[in-house]
Image (cartoon, rainbow, N blue to C red):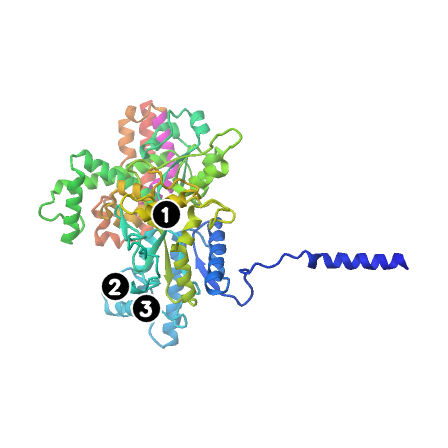
Amino acid sequence: MLKKTLIILSAAIVLALPFVFEKKKDLGEWNEGDPVLVVISPHIAVIRDEFAAGFSDWHFRKFGSPVRIDWRSIGGTTEIMRYMTGEYVSAFKAYRARCGLPNRRAEAAVSGRRPQDPDSAELWDDFRKHDDPDDYGIMIDVFFGGGTYDHSSAARQGLTVPPWQPDNVPENILTDSQTGAVLIPESLGGEIWRTPYFYSAVLSGFGICSNPDRLRDIGASHQPVAWEDLTDPVYFSQIGVTDPTKSGSIAKAFEMIIHSQCRKHVLAEGWTPEQIEEFEKAVGAAGLPAGVMPDGVPAKYQKDVEQGWLDGLRLIRLIGANVRYFTDSAGKVPIDVAAGDAAAGISIDFYSRVQAEVTYDSVNNRTRLLYATPSGGSSISGDPISLLRGSRNVELARRFIEYVLSEDGQKLWNYRPGTPGGPVKSALRRLPVRRDFYPSRSNAVFNARANAHAQYTSDQLTDPAVDAYELASKFVYHPRWTGSHFSFFRNFIRAMCMDSGTELRAAWKAIIDAGGPEACPQAMELLCRMPEAPYPVTWAETLAPENRNYDTMECMRQWTVFFRETYKAAEKAAIERR
């Protein structure tokens, strides 16, 4: 009997153990019925996880309920923009059909500019009159991450709406209530950081990552620190690059390469920074067609800008000739470089910082990944956050945007895991946008806050080499030079370096084997040719309205055919040179 009683008692204890040691739920743990926010984002998983946890905790403390974020991750910003545009067009068509209204040319509603013909203009106007999810929405509330180009495009297309009116922005988001100083500037170094439609949540630069062991193996004389370094034949089949048509951030990096060559050529021709600033202001104020200079701005100045633009495209072509592969994912390049699968690559700064930390050999005090932002080779641009039209959770969406821009949200970008207010698991190693995270010579309060943050940050934000505001002040971005060509660059670089990549690399290998570029002037001349069809590829022609209306796929087809043929001719000329 005693034995039977002991058996029953033991069984009861075993059954009770899970309840005795059950972990109590956190007060901020989400339950069915609590709010859900739908966010579309190109951000990597660790960023999504940290901001989901951080926002839920913040919302619980301020509003009494946790929040679950339903992430929509479908790829890079290019894929996101295509998806959202298609979804809004479909929703708009369905709305018009319910109202008994004509739907012909409904795509005109999401055009980046108001169409000229009355029917399309009526659709364009009608689309922007509505922000009711019952009329049309895409069941997504917030667009979080990606570059300013795509968020600007989303605003022009009417896909996003201002989260707040200018006089209704939450306290301590744009302006510090204690000092009255600006916390998030509208722009710096020529880059737009915020508009009423989008707000940069974090800052990025672009540069070169490299593996010191692989550099030694291939015989590189030094760490690549300038874009031109990547054209050295020593890097043949050693560079990792991301497809610019898949990543808006890497497309921006390519724009930076071209922009830096514009500036380099203009300065080499004797124009001073002061003259450049004066000329660009005059051109902007005149409002003339692209490439037409107002009185007082020399025609030669514009020609020098255009020559630098071509120099930049040719520089990218030579980098493409050294490419080992193109990938769809911008985060893959620093991972491969750290692993030794490539010697160097073009990278967004924070991807390289994170990978350098993950792969650091603390036992032997050795780094497997180096990173450098080329001096004068990159601006500091923003990754914004925007409120989507037709949000079903608009107040919750505004709160999320407020959190991301607040001091609490900004800590996640660069605080070390486990520090007060920092990430739970992973260091994100990104540059916060708020001014009070960086030192200030003119604002003692900001300076004190920056020093207080510095004890917890992964990167020394007070170091001029890391300080985003210091870096931004050293690179002056002139949007007129390259900004309007952004979409062109994406497609043209793909045709020039990817779709004709096999022929490009074969030609470059033949030139290297024949003694290098200086020994093969005819082959190099062929290699560097630019297409004349369907229109001449020049700074001005690519902006001409009649040329911008060409079918993109047809342009890329003609460019690819041209490049394949000219690269084959360059290879033949190099072989004959041997």
Neighbor class of circle 3 (other Cα within 10 Å; few <14, some 14-19, many 20+) is: many
Mark 1 neighbour density, 10 Å: few (under 14) some (14–19) many (20 or more): some
**Image position of 264 (left or right of 279):** right
Would residue 370 be visible to someone looking at this image? yes
| Helix, strand or loop: magenta stretch | helix
Disc 2: which residue: 114
331 on left or right of 433:
right
Judging by the rendered image, the residue that carries numbered circle 1 is 449
* Callout 1 amino acid: Arg
- Residue type, mark 2 in image: Arg
Magenta residue span: 490-512
- The quadrant in which residue 576 appears is top left
Circle 3 sits on which residue?
Answer: 127
Residue 440 location (% of width, % of height): 30, 44
Relative depth, front residue between 248 and 2: 2
- The kind of secondary structure element at disc 3 is helix
Closer to viewer: mark 1 or mark 2? 1
Q: Is residue 523 above or below residue 140?
A: above
Viewport quadrant of the N terminus: bottom right
Image coordinates of residue 344 in percent, x first then y, are 41, 34
**Element on which disc 1 rests:** helix
Whole-percent x and y of residue 54? Answer: 47, 55
